[in-house]
Amino acid sequence: MSNLLTISLNNVRFRAYHGVHPDERQKGNDFVVNMQVCYITGKKALMSLDDTIDYAVLFDIINLTMQRPVDLLETLVQTMANEVHLHFPQVKKVIVEVEKLNPPIDKFTGTVAVKYIKEY
């Protein structure tokens, strides 16, 4: 039986310019990204960065994606998951969630989020 390892990036915060409303593209909003990446490790102990998935590269994927404005949070999470798998084909599952902290909804208090789960 194979061993499954999960690497998580939690509560990664950004100021970004995503959204369908012109105001969101001009003023921006605060976002939080959470990502879990699961892969099979094999039988040997992991002793080198070459044996695992570099979470700094995962952060770079998140960061670059968050810098390119899009209309939908759905686009963000799908793009991030696909980029992770392109960089690390050994990945078996990616879970990405993007939360918008101040959605432009009248009389709404709270946050909105989109979570994407992709298995390979």
Image (cartoon, rainbow, N blue to C red):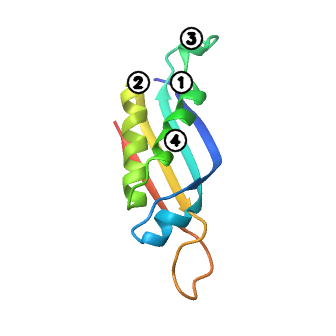
Foreground tag (3 vs 2)? 2
Residue behind mark 1: 53
Q: Which is more N-terminal, label 3 or label 4? A: 3
Residue at x 54% of width, y 28% of height? 57
Residue 37 percent coordinates (x, y): 50, 36
Task: Name the residue located 59 percent from the left edge and 30 percent from the top edge.
Answer: 55
Q: Residues within 10 Å of mark 2 (few under 14, many from 20)?
A: some
Contact, mark 1 vs mark 2 (Cβ under 8 Å): yes
Of marks 2 and 4, the one in the foreground: 4
Rate crowding at label 1 as few (under 14), some (14 to 19) or many (20 or more) other CA atoms within 10 Å: many
The label nearer to you, 4 versus 3, is 4
Amino acid, disc 4:
Ile
Compute the Cα span from label 2 to label 4. 18 Å
**Is 53 placed above or below 14 here?**
above
Q: Residue furthest left?
A: 120
Whether label 3 touches label 2, CB < 8 Å: no
Amino acid tagged 2: Gln
The residue that mark 3 highlights is 44
Task: Give yes or no for contact between labels 2 and 4 (Cβ–Cβ under 8 Å).
Answer: no
Report, in whole angstroms, how far the alpha carbon at label 1 lies from the one at label 2: 9 Å
Taking the spot 52% from the left edge, 56% from the top edge, the residue there is 98
Q: Dividing the image into 4 quarters, which one contains the C terminus?
A: top left
| Residue 112, disc | none
Q: Nearer the viewer, residue 61 or 11?
A: 61
Across and down, in percent, residue 61 comes to: 49, 36
Residue placed most toward the observer, 46 or 75 = 75
Residue 62: which numbered mark, if any? Answer: 4
Q: CA distance from mark 3 to mark 2?
A: 16 Å
| Residues at discs 1 and 3 in contact (Cβ within 8 Å) | no
Circle 2 SS class: loop
Which residue position holds label 2? 90
Task: Give x and y (percent) for residue 109.
Answer: 62, 81
